[in-house]
Image: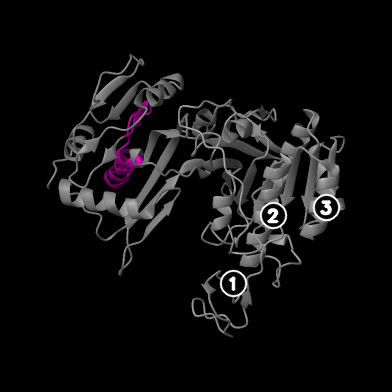
């Protein structure tokens, strides 16, 4: 029987059944190579006459014990992991260059090692002396973490098999090199092979593996998307270079809730936990001004208050600018269109700038009403009350829709000293949170009641 050959591009990952000098998908030259079988994977696509073993089946009613977890002692990290580190799990951590991924994982490795785990830190980007220098700066030089600088995947797996660690940190997966793949480190095939081998090793040996991944200029983890499907947990380390706050966000977690966040503050001695992020994000708010609104949001299971800022200014001749930091630009355009169509408030000929203070990034539609309030406040030069929070989703018809976990949001606002909330009508009466609730049904009524504007004029 003829051998079935497959070829793939080392730049974009496109597959084909025959070799060619130029990739039809991305146009790169001399990047097509034959896909070789993984050392720990199936050797042939055909099972032949060999009989496999019969698998044990179970049903949906069977209950198994929850996987054991080891806590790092870093509350924000344990929260994002779903309660601690699970044995035999594979975790992928991505983030912009210089955001603090290596610092975070070195601090986590030291905490896990002090809690009794056998931890090995494998660096492929730095020398051991560079990592040791960072450890001294963070005050972690006495932590029982084993360190090695290597990129050869075969040598790394052999060493791990002999040392039998509980946790392995690979910094980073893009620097790993397998001699079974004929391409450069960092290519699609090399990243896929390294991730598969390390994940398979973690599952078969019962150890936890944390992989550091580089990100592209679009913000996605570099390499094939299949890597994110292989691992159990995908974390993104976010933050703005000009701010000291860093946010660790879980976008996938098989052992806990997704979209959970942990908040850290970058200091001279490393990353410090932020116990009350809402208070920290609002601590530098100052005197309320036009265009400033406080939004009560939810990130994962945590209520989080943050400030949304808007600025509206006359535009130069030509197309008006729409600049957004920390929110979805397409959703901003939708809010502007609804304000124009349903309320008669036009932003034509005006530059619009929107910012979520503190380097926070918001993705939930519950911020729609707060964004609309900030835009109208900036346009009309009107200041909203200092003790008021605003939340609600806006539909294309201009109606205001309720949002999830309303009670938790209101309790967080009350805890931080707010006394009033403007929001859509509640489907059912919530427990008393100590706030004065102003329930408004549509955006036109909101504009009229809060800003005294006549919709449609």
At x 63% / y 28%, what residue is drawn? Answer: 75
Q: Residue at position x 52%, y 37% from top?
A: 57
Q: Secondary structure at mark 3?
A: helix
Displayed quadrant of residue 173? bottom right
* Quadrant in which the N terminus appears: bottom right
Element under label 1?
A: loop
The reply, left or right, for residue 457 in relation to residue 195 is: left
Q: Which residues are magenta?
A: 367-391
- Distance, label 1 to label 3, CA atoms, is 29 Å
Q: Which mark is residue 226?
A: none
Percent across and percent down for residue 27 are: 52, 81
What number is the disc on residue 197?
A: 2
Residue 304 lies, in percent from the top left, at 46, 31
- Mark 2 or mark 1, whichever is nearer to me: 2
When the figure is inspected, residue 208 is found, relative to residue 45, above or below; the finding is above
385 is within the stretch colored magenta: yes
43 is higher (above) or lower (below) than 231: below
Q: Position of residue 215 (x, y in %)?
A: 59, 57
Residue assigned mark 3:
158
Q: Is residue 132 left or right of residue 311?
A: right
Mark 2 or mark 1, earlier in chain: 1
Tell me if 120 is positioned left or right of 326 in this view.
Answer: right
The disc label shown at residue 11, or none: 1
Residue 373 in percent (x, y) is at 30, 40
Instruction: Look at the image and name its color scheme.
Output: one colour
Q: Please name the residue shown 49% across and 80% down the image.
A: 24
Q: Answer whether residue 354 is visible to the viewer in this image.
A: yes
- Residue 151, visible in the rendered structure: no
Q: CA distance from mark 2 to mark 1?
A: 20 Å
Q: Nearer the viewer, residue 55 or 363?
A: 55
Q: Nearer the viewer, residue 82 or 398?
A: 82
How packed mark 3 is, by other alpha carbons closer than 10 Å (few <14, some 14-19, many 20 or more), is few
């Amino acid at each position: 029987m003829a051998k079935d050959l497959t070829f793939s591009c080392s730049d974009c990952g496109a597959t084909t059944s025959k070799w060619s000098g130029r990739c039809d998908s991305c146009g790169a030259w001399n990047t097509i190579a034959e896909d070789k079988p993984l050392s720990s994977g199936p050797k042939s696509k055909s099972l032949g006459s060999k009989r496999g073993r019969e698998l044990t089946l179970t049903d949906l009613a069977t209950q198994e014990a929850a996987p054991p977890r080891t806590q790092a002692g870093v509350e924000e990290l344990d929260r994002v992991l779903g309660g601690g580190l699970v044995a035999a799990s594979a975790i992928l951590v991505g983030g912009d260059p210089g955001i603090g991924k290596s610092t975070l994982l070195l601090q986590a490795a030291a905490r896990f090692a002090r809690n009794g785990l056998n931890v090995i830190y494998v660096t492929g980007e730095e020398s051991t002396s560079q990592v040791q220098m960072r450890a001294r700066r963070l005050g972690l030089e006495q932590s029982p973490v084993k360190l090695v600088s290597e990129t050869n995947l075969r040598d790394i797996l052999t060493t791990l098999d002999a040392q039998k660690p509980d946790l392995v940190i690979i910094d980073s997966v893009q620097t790993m090199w397998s001699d079974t793949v004929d391409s450069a480190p960092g290519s699609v095939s090399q990243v896929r092979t390294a991730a598969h081998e390390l994940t398979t090793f973690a599952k078969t040996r019962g150890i936890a593996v944390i992989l550091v991944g580089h990100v592209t200029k679009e913000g996605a983890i570099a390499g094939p998307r299949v890597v994110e499907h292989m691992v159990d947990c995908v974390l993104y380390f976010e933050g703005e270079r000009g701010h000291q706050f860093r946010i660790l966000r879980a976008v996938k977690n098989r052992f806990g809730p997704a979209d959970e966040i942990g908040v850290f503050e970058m200091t001279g001695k490393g990353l410090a936990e932020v116990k009350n992020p809402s208070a920290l994000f609002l601590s530098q708010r100052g005197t309320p001004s036009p265009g400033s609104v406080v939004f009560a949001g939810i990130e994962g299971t945590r209520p989080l208050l943050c400030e949304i800022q808007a600025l509206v200014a006359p535009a130069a001749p030509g197309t008006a600018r729409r600049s957004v930091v920390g929110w979805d630009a397409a959703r901003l355009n939708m809010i502007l269109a609804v304000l124009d169509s349903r309320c008669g408030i036009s932003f034509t000929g005006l530059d619009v700038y929107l910012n979520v203070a503190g380097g926070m990034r918001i993705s939930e539609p519950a911020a729609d009403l707060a964004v609309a309030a900030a835009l109208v406040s900036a346009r009309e030069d009107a200041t909203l009350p200092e003790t008021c929070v605003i939340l609600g989703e806006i539909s294309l018809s201009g109606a205001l829709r309720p949002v999830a976990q309303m009670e938790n949001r209101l309790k967080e606002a009350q805890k931080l000293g707010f006394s009033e909330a403007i929001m859509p009508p509640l489907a059912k009466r919530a427990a008393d949170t100590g706030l004065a609730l102003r329930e408004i049904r549509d955006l036109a009524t909101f504009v009229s009641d809060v800003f005294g504007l006549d919709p449609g004029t």
